Amino acid sequence: LPHLQPLVAAAFPLPPILGGRRGPLPRLPSMAVSLLAPVALAAPRSGIRQLRSRPRSKCTGIGVDGIGRPNVGASNVRCLSGADARYSRATAAHRRPDWFVADGCRRHRTRAAAAATADPKLTFDQEAGGYTKAFLNVRLTVFLSILVGYSCYYLTRNSLTFTAPAMVATASLGLDITSIGVITSIFPLCYGCSKFVSGVVGDVLSPSVMLGGGLIATGLVNIAFGASSTLPLFCMLWAINGILQGFGAPSCAKILTSWFAAKERGTYWGMWNIAHNLGGFAAPILAGTAARTLGWSWGLWAPGIIALVFGSVILLTLKDSPEDRGFGPVEQTKQVVVDPAKSASENEQAVEKQPSLLQNLFQNVLSNPFIWGLAFTYFCVYVVRQGITSWSVFYLIKEKGVLDAGAAALRVSGLELGGLLGSLVAGRISDWYIATSPGGAVGKRIQVVMAYMFGVAAMLLAFQAVPAGYPITQSIIVFMIGFFLYGPQMLIGLCGAEIVGRRSVGASEGFLGWIAYLGAANAGVPLSLLVQQYGWNAFFIALLSACAVGILLLAPITGAKSHIQRSQEQA
């Protein structure tokens, strides 16, 4: 079998002392060739293509993705010298690869070499022009994991709200409404700070571990809360719950940006955003019913047990990115230039060098003026959102003559439903807009946000103008307020993730979330004082002003490009 000799040598390069690299190739015994030939013939074409190489003097770069992972997918193989690398038996027979691969977690080169010889799973179907069926099936399970997981976060977040009446009615606890207010007031402060810190720290941690581990921890806190009986312990546990709740959103954002390309990300981000609504819908049914029928403790225990179950499943099964499941990345990769004059170890250190947490935060997030524009717009959006959520029932009772809180709550119950539909439509429209017209992807999503903000302002004017005797019209207007309001809430977070790239998604989402909750805090006491001093007309003027300021802040960003687009232009 002498004709198999070069093929075997290509798949199994010899050390220099045996004539491998830089040395003449000795003739292998026929028995060795016979044993190794089936293995070499079974090697995939993509693996052999990656084993071949150019001489070191011609190598100008290596292929890695946006966070430094190796390109091992067949659809992503490219010649490292930039030329058309054709298979040469003479070259493959006496040279090992002259390139190296380094990923963002500083794994050894031996893993990259093993990945090169392994049979990678295909992400794209070249014949059909889309994703492979295997990749779509895996990605569907990933999406369902983050959707259900974040819904469970909302379940454990809202459990106290619907258990509180049963706690106040339990005489042995000695709690009143003021005590419940003290407990709940701690949560937003801890949650806002935690979302910022966990987003920054999460850029160097596994998002799947953060998502699943945080869900397990918040479930344990709910169970411990249900077993407690004193106000100081209640306050401490609910503060811990606020800290743990901050792990959810940044983790999901990182997973979404890894598994979904920019052309489709808006649609799936909008679909994931309905987790807010699903969790908010399930909380009163599960926690409220359990507290009323089984006792107040079960209002916390039932959501806690569910969080433990789903958190464990996520921790054991969810993967951070397609590369962790053996697929290629969904985004086009960027080229990292390697200096041929330097040694391999020097080039490897240059590629593996990653910024620290603070460097990542300041260089990639806080130094970006577009991020600040998005953050202050987020502040305005949350002022409007929290203002409508907190004060619309009081407005209907005081100004529109609604008899009781139950009837008023029924008229505003469509806010969340409208938000669910608005998020889905906003994501789909932004994807369609990007696909059908050239220009910056982030800027096009911003234009959709601006259109939605005009819609919010129009619905606020209609809500104020509609007479008291039209309950159905009021319900429809509230539904449309939710429709136009939740679209910007979803898209601004998406724009913040796309404008900084995968390496800094957590820090970006954490910073935006922190600023957003500062806006929500300003919709509480400040708006209540405004209503007391100047009436409800001042309330609507404040919300309309927030819409106008948000639109003005977004105007300079309408041409912004995503991180992927900027990387492609620089390549």
Image: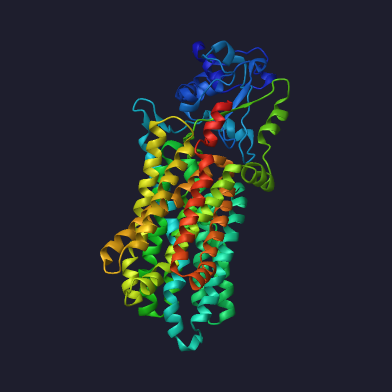
Quarter of the image for the C terminus: give it: top right
At 34% from the left and 56% from the top, the residue drawn is 480
Residue 68, given in percent of the width and then of the height, sits at 59, 35
Residue farthest to the bottom?
171
Judge whether 442 appears above or below 510 on screen: above
At 57% from the left and 23% from the top, the residue drawn is 12
Front-most of 409 and 121?
A: 409
At 57% from the left and 75% from the top, the residue drawn is 235
Residue 23, given in percent of the width and then of the height, sits at 68, 14
Front-most of 291 and 540?
A: 540
Residue 326 in view here: no
Residue 484, given in percent of the width and then of the height, sits at 39, 52
Q: Quadrant of residue 20?
A: top right
For the image, the number of numbered tags is 0
Query: In the image, 463: left or right of 309?
Result: left
Residue 189, given in percent of the width and then of the height, sits at 58, 65
Q: Coloured how?
A: rainbow
Front-most of 326 and 379?
A: 379
Judge whether 329 appears above or below 460 on screen: above
Judge whether 501 appears above or below 545 on screen: above
Judge whether 13 appears above or below 412 on screen: above
Residue 273 in view here: yes
Front-most of 79 and 22?
A: 79
